[in-house]
Image: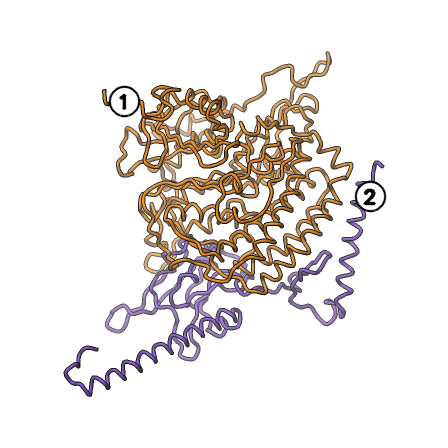
Amino acid sequence: MSEMSAQETLPYHEAVPGAVLERLENGSLIVAADKLLQLGTYLRDHEGYDLLSSVTGVDYLGYKGRDASNRFEVVYHLYSTKRGGGPLVLKVRMPESNPELPSVVSVWPGAELQEREIWDLYGIRFTGHPNLRRILLWEGFNGHPMRKDWHEAYYEEEHKPFRSRHPNGHHVLAEDRAPWHDNVFYPEGWDPEIWQEPIVQYRLPTDPSLGTTGDLPTERIVVNFGPQHPSTHGVFRMIVTLEGETIVGLEPEVGYLHRNHEKIGERNTYLMNMPFTDRLDYLCSMSNNLGYALAVEKLIGAEVPERAEYLRIIMVELTRIINHLLAIGFLLNDLGAFFTPVLYAFEERELILDLFEEAAGSRMMCNYMRFGGVAHDVSEDWLERCRYLVNERLPRRVDELERLLTENEIVVARCKGVGYLSPEDAIALSVTGPLLRASGVQYDIRKAEPYSIYDRFDFEIPVYHGCDVYDRYRVRVAEIRQSIRILQQALKDIPPGEIQSGKKQHLLRVPPGEVYSRIEAPKGELGFYIVSDGSPNPFRYHIRAPSFVNLTALGPMSVGYKVADAIINLGSIDIVLGETDR
Amino acid sequence: MFGKGVLKGLGVTMKHWLYTYVDDIRKIPSRYAGGRDILKQMPDEEGIFTIQYPEEKRVIPERYRFTPMLLYDAATGKDLCTACGICTKVCPTQCIWIVRDKDEKGKPISRPAEFYIDASLCMNCGLCSEFCPFGAIKPNHDFERAVYDRHQDMIYDKQALLVPLEYHAAIHPTEYAEEEAAKAAKAQAKARRAQSRRRRGSAADRKPGEDGAD
């Protein structure tokens, strides 16, 4: 009797009985795997949780209070694009043997790549997933590396600081310690004589009506773009199915730059991860720093002094300008305007990077933010030069960039109406950032769930309704202007004072718990999901990378357009492979 | 009119092309006259700015980080490093290793006998110098460090890492001045404390009953 009434008080009991098994102290809901789809559909249609921001797995092996019956967990973070505000967190727990749960791709198609990543790294199977194969690693890879009991070939120790890489003062390279052959582990029953590389089954379009022209007999061909192609922004591969020149199917292939950043992150201490975040989206290291610092600060409850808050905003908005300038420049590169617009973007970027170098010590790998502040203060001269840039030079240069591109007939002809992504599709595919706002959805985390001190500044969220490549370009230009506006206010108001609260510590005491913290990075929503078990190293460290999730939209966006448009569609998404592959 | 946008864009390109020359003319004598120099782009330069490396070089800002160096005091010949090992613990890539020195009796003393940095692992993050309590390890500015063999030549031992304090003062003038000021303030405070203790001590001399309270 009492059990019944306890169940009735659980949220969404009336709509989907028995779906929510438990409500945790931090507000997240434990969901029954078999009711997940039903609950998801209800939440999407009736509760307004239309944006599935992050899906990730956690392996709780060895965590206090967990055993083999609930070793694995998949965590969903749902947001509402209309209401804004905080997340609804769903969790599904699974036993150690044969972890399996239904795929939510039918409810939120944006889960596709993220679920593939969980399958790849954790070996959690998603039933009903349309294309469940490995994504970051290759087919045939032995094991699932994010599991706590999986060790790499040159495994040293579980946590840093390591005991020694230099025993008795002699340096030993990892490959000498475990030389070739000694580090090779053969799975049970594996025989190199009979083993054959698995055949990768790419998903090819099945709809025969797509792209056919009249009664001309045609044949579909599959073209491989990349991984080394000058216009693929790095080592990125697209498998494009063509009917004549029309794309009928496109599948992105990533993982060429995969280094298992998250596993490295779990070995590191909290502070050690800071310089590693620089290397995610290496064009926007300041934004990555801020995202990570905010997440850890939420866990430890650190205060940030006023001046440090302003410095953070200044750095992050300068980063946004850099990123959008480069995004526009490289989009034009993809269009064939080879390197003139990029070079003009680089001119401004150089000056901003000079400022970064003076403030942080490095142009791209800034490593500038610390928990509870920033690493270094800036001088009055620095601020003066920055003021000159944002008050005089950058507005003029953005006008000039617009004069160069916005009305250019070739740009308009190539970009207008290309890569259509409807607002509904954009939200369903978990697209965020300028891409979403170019599809007419006014959703920006700086306004929807303000972090740091963004609520103090007067700025707008530019939104365009063209849903095409041209509007993605225009949204970026408009965002540069808004960033300049924020910078002008921040540089006017920046107070003197401390830049670090408390004493700087290299070993943090982090209470057990978990946090998901997200910021509006230049490319979209950058989220850090951290689980702490109270030790100096994070137990789980996950990055919800905007360019990775935005790639889900590349296929749907490109089908029906010409093969040359696939490249500018990719350019308009603006990916950085360091972040996509992690 | 169709083509107006393209023409406008061409105008912008033309302007950019001209500006590069305007920048050069504004700087008379030209940077190419009288030998090559280290250069810095000013924010008010409108054209394309190119540095002809390696003949010309950029001005490197003070906080620029590269593989660390180890400081010693040339006047006394002593290392600043006390082999406390904080840098080895904070290093994200675990590329530092210290062997603590021993005195004649074999007791460990606060001086490194060996100090290694594997530069092939170092990611130039600067955390070691940020958390060094003695200011003994600092990011170097010397970035021209290509070698032929990564297994031997990229592992710097103490001899390769040591630089005199003057070098640090030369490349980090502001930081050095701040350190010196902090050191002076600390010494002053110490002297003041000692003075007040002396005064209290002499007061205690007058009242022998309160002796030992210090």
Q: Quadrant of residue B71?
A: bottom left
Assign the N terminus of chain A to one quadrant of the image. Answer: top left
Viewer-closest of B153 and A145:
A145
Q: Quadrant of residue A28?
A: top left
Amino acid type assigned to the residue bearing label 1 in the image: Ser
Inter-mark Cα distance, 1 to 2: 74 Å
Q: Check the residue under mark 1 and report the chain it is in.
A: A
Q: Colour of chain A?
A: orange
Query: Of residues A363 and A309, which is closer to you in this image?
Result: A309
Find disc 1 in the rendering and name its residue: A5
A348 left or right of A528 in image: right
Given residues A102 and A438, the one toward you in this image is A438
Residue A102, percent from left and from top:
41, 22
Chain drawn purple in the picture: B
Residue at left 50%, top 35%? A84
Q: Residues within 10 Å of mark 2 (few under 14, many from 20)?
A: some
